[in-house]
Image (cartoon, rainbow, N blue to C red):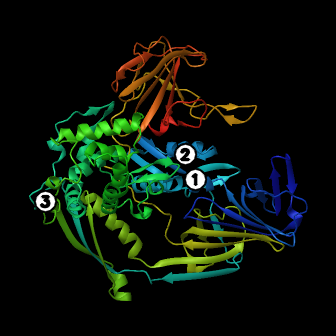
């Protein structure tokens, strides 16, 4: 073997092979990345540090591993232990938000790899389009595993991801060379048949929902109004879609009545705040802040409240609602009393986001006031007014019309052999097809004997998890095709050997996914879902080479492009992507004629930059524009070499540099 260590600051490659005692390289289908543990007998003045690169070659000079040092342990006897991960580790550790109207696995893979600044290698061609994908703050590995599972369900093709020579690749399983194992090469072959986790019969009850909405009424003298009762405006202070947000809260009406009775708080007040914060989305997660992330129906940030909360339970609707009621009635109420403010709807809404006099808290106060008035309520009334509280009894559960399907699945051959082992399964499904898919997955995973093989043999670079393996005819107990589940390569003074765990069944994780009925992104939703529009109509532009962070200053090697370039002829109309307030309308040496506007998108306020316009926009600073309204035309002004729109998304406001700029392709399907 040969092991090389690359130190960037010293600009030097160190050959550390003479000091390497042992290298263990491990991988599994549960994760995309490989881990190398390298034991080194003496540091020999090599400056080992985290972040530096390591390459491991076999005796035949084939690259077996390339990655970075993530852990460096130095011992008293000057020996060193390095823990290294290859580039696929970044997919495991990084989270992303993906919202797309239409996307292929191939394009998704490239987008995520480029997002974390990694190089793309071979990418298998995939043609199946997936509609309405939405992942919010989800590990990239889980996103890719989910869509790879969807690809298998739709096309029958299986894919895996690997790091090769510093590049990340998406490959179809079976398309590349696997491992063929002959009896004379295998040092040890152990075949295992395991029925300990097997069921031979499954009885199931499935409710197929047909779609009636909860009314939210209670069996008390108090009932809570639904979105159908709202008579207020749909747009308040440039934020639109209030009808949709209120409709999302209707399913929680019964619980709000129940909590209102238990805690002594106005249920309609809870409904209004929930509409503002999450639109009734139980699993809503806000962007990172210095105190942590906002979670659940009322977007509670554990680190920003004094009330003790269990962050792991805040994505459970009832717990989140009860904690919100406690926060309103205790710490927020105490602050209001200390400042001499009454516990009214508008005042308590203001206190929920911090009692300050800048734009967002004041807008929040106005939203609550108008929404509460839209239901016929008095926003100056107390949230603890006894006349608004449920008088007793308990809230009725919302009724859902369902078609109940019952049945059983039996594996008679397995039952005859093992005896009857029954599992009870129940669930609610959106359609019969969804239920059938769930039952098929149960049948494939729970009603079979697991068959696996542990085999030790001379090492080969193709012995990697995700690949296929086959035995030649000389090993009669292990015929047919197998899948490598785990691999461990060991390189030491005795050479290179590998230990593989093979399964008769491909057990690559495939997380389940159902497109959300409502976006996690609030009222102004990305164009991939609904509610927003593209800055230039489809078919009237092409995406330029300059995308987010795609341009690098060669002097420092730093990414510098803060938006996306859409190439279009001069005069092509530019549209407001959402309802916006024009913040600036001016000429810049770099941007040329440009507009900076603010509006709601992606669960909060954003600012948008339209640069290089041909002439000044007719909309003055301080004026409001609606989604889809023309705000200018494509030009070639400023630092521009061809007619195009340079478009940016900024969170929360525009500023120099990349620190507060977001990738526009997270929000729009260009």
Residue 365, located in which quarter of the rendered image?
A: top left
Could you tell me residue 163's position as x and y percent? 65, 53
Rendered view: 342 above or below 659: below
Frontmost residue, 637 versus 448: 637
Q: Quadrant of the N terminus?
A: bottom right
Q: Residues within 10 Å of mark 2 (few under 14, many from 20)?
A: many
Task: First in sequence, mark 1 or 2: give its number.
Answer: 1
Circle 1/circle 2 CB separation < 8 Å: yes
For mark 3, what is the residue?
218
Q: Residues within 10 Å of mark 3 (few under 14, many from 20)?
A: many
Q: Which tag is nearer the camera, tag 3 or tag 1?
A: 3
Q: Position of residue 434 (x, y in %)?
A: 29, 59
Q: Nearer the viewer, residue 527 or 384?
A: 384
Nearer to us: label 2 or label 3: 3
**Residue bearing the label numbered 1:** 91
Left or right: 593 as drawn, with respect to 220? right
User: Horizontal and vertical percent for residue 51?
Assistant: 73, 53
Spatial distance from mark 1 to mark 2, Cα to Cα? Answer: 8 Å
| Residue matched to label 2 | 112
- Spatial CA span between label 2 and label 3: 47 Å
Q: Secondary structure at mark 3?
A: loop
What's the residue at 47%, 51% (across, down)?
137
**Can residue 13 be seen?**
yes
Q: Is residue 35 left or right of residue 338?
A: right
Judged from the image, the secondary structure of the residue bearing numbered disc 1 is: helix
Number of numbered discs present? 3
Question: Of helix, strand and loop, which one carries label 2?
Answer: helix
Left or right, residue 187 beside residue 176: right
- The answer to whether residue 31 is above or below residue 590 is below
The answer to whether residue 422 is left or right of residue 444 is left
Q: In this view of the protein, can residue 297 be seen by the observer? A: no
């Amino acid at each position: 073997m040969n092991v090389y260590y690359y130190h960037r600051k010293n600009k030097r490659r160190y050959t550390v092979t003479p000091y390497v005692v042992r290298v263990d390289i491990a991988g599994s289908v549960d994760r995309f990345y490989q881990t190398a543990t390298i034991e080194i007998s003496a540091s020999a003045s090599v400056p080992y540090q985290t972040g530096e690169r390591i390459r491991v070659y076999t005796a035949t000079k084939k690259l077996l591993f390339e990655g970075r040092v993530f852990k460096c342990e130095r011992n008293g006897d000057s020996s060193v232990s390095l823990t290294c991960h290859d580039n696929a580790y970044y997919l495991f550790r990084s989270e992303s938000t993906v919202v797309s109207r239409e996307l292929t696995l191939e394009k998704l893979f490239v987008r995520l790899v480029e997002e974390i600044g990694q190089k793309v290698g071979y990418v298998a061609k995939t043609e199946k389009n997936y509609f309405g994908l939405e992942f919010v703050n989800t590990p990239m590995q889980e996103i890719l595993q989910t869509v790879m599972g969807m690809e298998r369900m739709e096309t029958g093709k299986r894919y895996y991801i690997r790091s090769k020579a510093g590049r990340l690749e998406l490959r179809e399983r079976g398309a590349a060379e696997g491992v063929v194992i002959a009896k004379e090469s295998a040092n040890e072959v152990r075949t295992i048949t395991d029925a300990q986790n097997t069921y031979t019969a499954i009885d199931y009850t499935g409710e197929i929902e047909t779609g009636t909405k909860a009314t939210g009424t209670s069996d008390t003298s108090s009932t809570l109004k639904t979105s159908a009762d709202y008579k207020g405006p749909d747009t308040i202070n440039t934020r639109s879609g209030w009808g949709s947000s209120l409709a999302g809260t209707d399913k929680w009406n019964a619980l709000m009545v129940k909590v209102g009775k238990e805690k002594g708080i106005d249920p309609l007040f809870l409904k209004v705040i929930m509409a503002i914060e999450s639109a009734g989305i139980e699993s809503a997660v806000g962007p990172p802040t210095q105190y942590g992330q906002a979670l659940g129906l009322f977007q509670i940030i554990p680190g920003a409240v004094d009330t003790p909360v269990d962050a792991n339970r805040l994505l459970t609707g009832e717990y989140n609602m009860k904690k919100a009621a406690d926060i309103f009635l205790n710490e927020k109420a105490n602050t209001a009393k200390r400042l001499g403010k009454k516990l009214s709807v508008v005042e308590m809404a203001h206190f929920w986001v911090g009692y300050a006099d800048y734009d967002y808290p004041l807008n929040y106060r106005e939203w609550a006031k108008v929404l509460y008035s839209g239901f016929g309520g008095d926003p100056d009334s107390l949230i603890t007014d006894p006349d608004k509280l449920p008088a007793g009894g308990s809230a009725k559960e919302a009724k859902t019309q369902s078609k109940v399907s019952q049945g059983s699945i039996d594996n008679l051959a397995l039952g005859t052999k093992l005896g009857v082992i029954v599992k009870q399964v129940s669930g609610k499904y959106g359609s019969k097809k969804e239920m059938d898919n769930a039952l098929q997955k149960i049948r494939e995973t729970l009603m079979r004997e697991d068959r696996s093989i542990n085999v030790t043999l001379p090492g080969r670079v193709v012995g990697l998890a995700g690949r296929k393996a086959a035995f030649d005819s000389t090993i009669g107990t292990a015929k047919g095709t197998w899948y490598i589940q785990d691999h461990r390569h060991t390189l030491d003074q005795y050479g290179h050997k590998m230990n593989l765990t093979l399964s008769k069944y491909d057990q690559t994780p495939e997380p389940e996914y159902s497109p959300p009925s409502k976006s996690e992104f609030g009222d102004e939703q990305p164009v991939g879902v609904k509610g927003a529009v593209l800055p230039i109509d489809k078919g009237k532009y092409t995406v330029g080479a300059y995308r987010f962070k795609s341009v690098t200053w060669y002097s420092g090697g730093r990414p510098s492009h803060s938006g996306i370039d859409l190439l279009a002829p001069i005069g092509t109309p530019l549209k407001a992507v959402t309802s916006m307030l024009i913040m600036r309308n001016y000429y810049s040496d770099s941007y040329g004629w440009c507009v900076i506007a603010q509006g709601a998108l992606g669960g909060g306020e954003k600012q948008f930059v339209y640069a290089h316009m041909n002439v000044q926009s007719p909309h003055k600073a301080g004026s409001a524009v609606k989604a889809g309204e023309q705000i200018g035309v494509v030009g070639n002004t400023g630092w521009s070499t061809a007619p195009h729109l340079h478009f940016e998304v900024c969170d929360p406001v525009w500023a120099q540099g990349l620190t507060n700029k977001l990738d526009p392709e997270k929000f729009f399907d260009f």
